[in-house]
Image (spheres, rainbow, N blue to C red):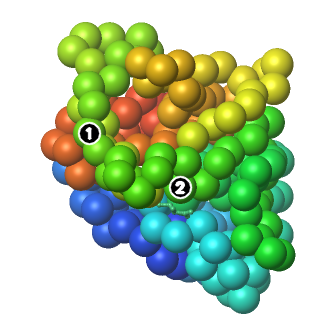
Amino acid sequence: TRPVGVLALQGDFREHIEVLRALGAEAVGVRRPEELAEVGGLIIPGGESTVIDKLSRTFGLAEPLKAAIARGLPVWGTCAGLIMLADRISDGIEGQQTLGGLDIEVRRNAFGSQSASFEVDLEMPVLGDPPLHAVFIRAPVVEAVGAGVRVLAQLDDARIVAVEQGSLLGTSFHPEITGDYRFHEYFLDRVAAQ
Ligand code: GLN
């Protein structure tokens, strides 16, 4: 079996690598196209989407990433990673690009400054009970989804914070820092089924 990659350009990629290893998976950081070619799945971590966008283009990774997404590599984007997988951003900065793949529109920093960071217990039917403790840090929200997108979780006010479409997963929050790794297991199951 091939290792699972974590895009290691910027953001909290080390935390994801540690979680994957704790779950018994072989995990590697991905910075170069040759490294991307070796992995059987990829996590795009949280961080700053504008920076991940720029670095992915500078390092010649943007086109290989788009090709990998197009051929069905299982990819999970969290927070900034979710923004990278979105086809549309409602408030991107000038010139900001995404890889796309998820037929969704996201709004960056969607929670005002007062609640820029918060934690909730999130009902997630695909994970069963108990709810997943979710940490939101200057998080994006999914404002619109296309017909092929499955909503995996919503906040109490119905705002969408987790989605799935084909081989792609996206979450607004940070499951790598709470000690509850059921969403990482969900992703690894999908990688193994590939
Ligand atoms: N606000 C960041 C962005 O726009 C995302 C924050 C995060 O990944 N925790 O990229």
- Looking at the image, which is closer to me, 32 or 95? 95
Say if 113 sits above or below 107 in the image: below
Q: Is residue 20 visible?
A: no
Question: Is 101 on the left-hand or right-hand side of 117?
Answer: right
Query: Decide: marks 2, 1 in contact (CB < 8 A)?
Result: no
Residue at numbered disc 2: 109
- Looking at the image, which is closer to me, 7 or 173? 173
Image point 32% across, 69% down: which residue?
A: 14
- Looking at the image, which is closer to me, 131 or 35? 131
Q: Check disc 1 and report its element: helix, strand or loop.
A: strand
Say if 171 sits above or below 38 in the image: above
Image point 21% across, 15% down: which residue?
A: 130
Please provide percent x and percent y for residue 51: 59, 78
Q: Label 2 CB, ligand 1: below 8 Å?
A: yes
- Image quarter where the C terminus lies is top right
Image point 53% across, 55% down: which residue?
A: 109
Q: Check disc 2 and report its element: helix, strand or loop.
A: loop
Say if 43 sits above or below 175 in the image: below
Q: How many marks overall?
A: 2
The three-letter amino acid code for the residue at tag 1 is: Glu
Question: Is 93 on the left-hand or right-hand side of 42?
Answer: right
Please provide percent x and percent y for residue 106: 68, 45
Say if 5 sits above or below 145 in the image: below
Residue at numbered disc 1: 119
The three-letter amino acid code for the residue at tag 2 is: Asn
